[in-house]
Amino acid sequence: MWSKLILVVISLLLINPAMADETGAGAENNDEWFTRQQKAIILNAGIMGGVLVHGFINWDYGKDSWHTKNEGWFGRTTKYGGMDKLGHFWSSYSGSHLLAYIYRKWGYADTDANLYGALSTFGIQSFMEVADGISGHGFSYEDAVANTVGVAAGFIWGKYPRLAEKVDFRMEYRPKFNSKDLDPFTNYERQRYLIAVKADGFKAVTNPILKYGELHVGYYAHGYDDYDSWDPDDDRKRTVFVGLGFNATRFIQKWVDLAVSDYIQIPYTAFNLEYDLD
């Protein structure tokens, strides 16, 4: 009972972005129904409330007493070979930028939007981890650390645009077009995570063709989804890769201001050399 009550209170009060300067880029639009501060509160409370409802319906929130769980990091015998930890990092990183974008659209100055985007994402992710503590999942310190590092990276990359021009953190998804593909964010079997270093961000690269080039370093793990400890055939495999890729964002932005490919790697647009760790 107390755990459920605490979760409801947290969902309403945890995140309340501070008031921004009322002048310049952060000025209010008096024609709006809500102020930008009220919108921010509604947004955060709405997301957390949605997580809470979904958790009680689908994730068994409230079924267990508070407990923690040691999930490990990237070991071969972990549940997903570390893919879930990279998923937490990437979702926190990209989520902070998504919320910062929304805050900018609502009139917050760039510096405030970047800060509040990071704080909101940290609050939402922390809320989910706390709630996991009263479900079958258990609170994972590893997940909490991955979330924190992802939010920190999102804040730093948002604060220093020149760094974002040079380096991206991306998730690649290669679907098989079956029922599991309806949930690409937790179908780790079809995911890859990578760091992309973009030639376009370096002034020393002047050749217009080379500006489309990228250097990739990444990781993926397969064979964990259908692994059974009773099965003598253990095909779990962790793989690191390096490669040369194509800067899709530079190409797309010739026609439309769309930066989604800074976060999502378009499949089969890179040539990779792979090394199996197992």
Image (cartoon, helix red, strand yellow):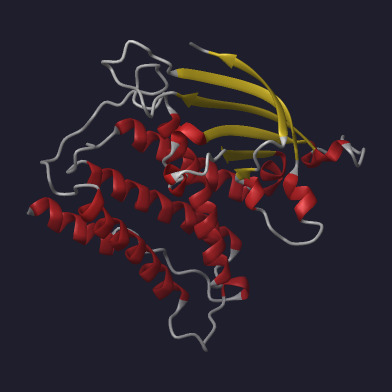
Residue 52: percent from left, percent from top:
25, 57
Residue at the spot x=26%, y=26% of the render? 70
Q: Residue at x 42, y 52 (%)?
A: 121
Where is the N terminus found, in terms of image quarters?
bottom left
Please report the residue visible at 52 percent of the width from the left and 66 percent of the height from the top: 103
Q: Does residue 225 lie above or below 185 as drawn?
A: above
Residue 34: give x, y in percent of width and height: 43, 81
Residue closest to the eye, 81 or 24: 81
Residue 39 left/right relative to 239:
left
Q: Position of residue 138 (x, y in %)?
A: 22, 36
Q: Eyeballing the image, is 179 above or below 110?
A: above
Residue found at the far front of this picture? 178
Inspect this view and state whether residue 203 appears. Answer: no
Left or right, residue 22 beside residue 135: right
The answer to whether residue 1 of the structure is visible from this angle is: yes
Identify the residue at image location x=36%, y=48%.
125
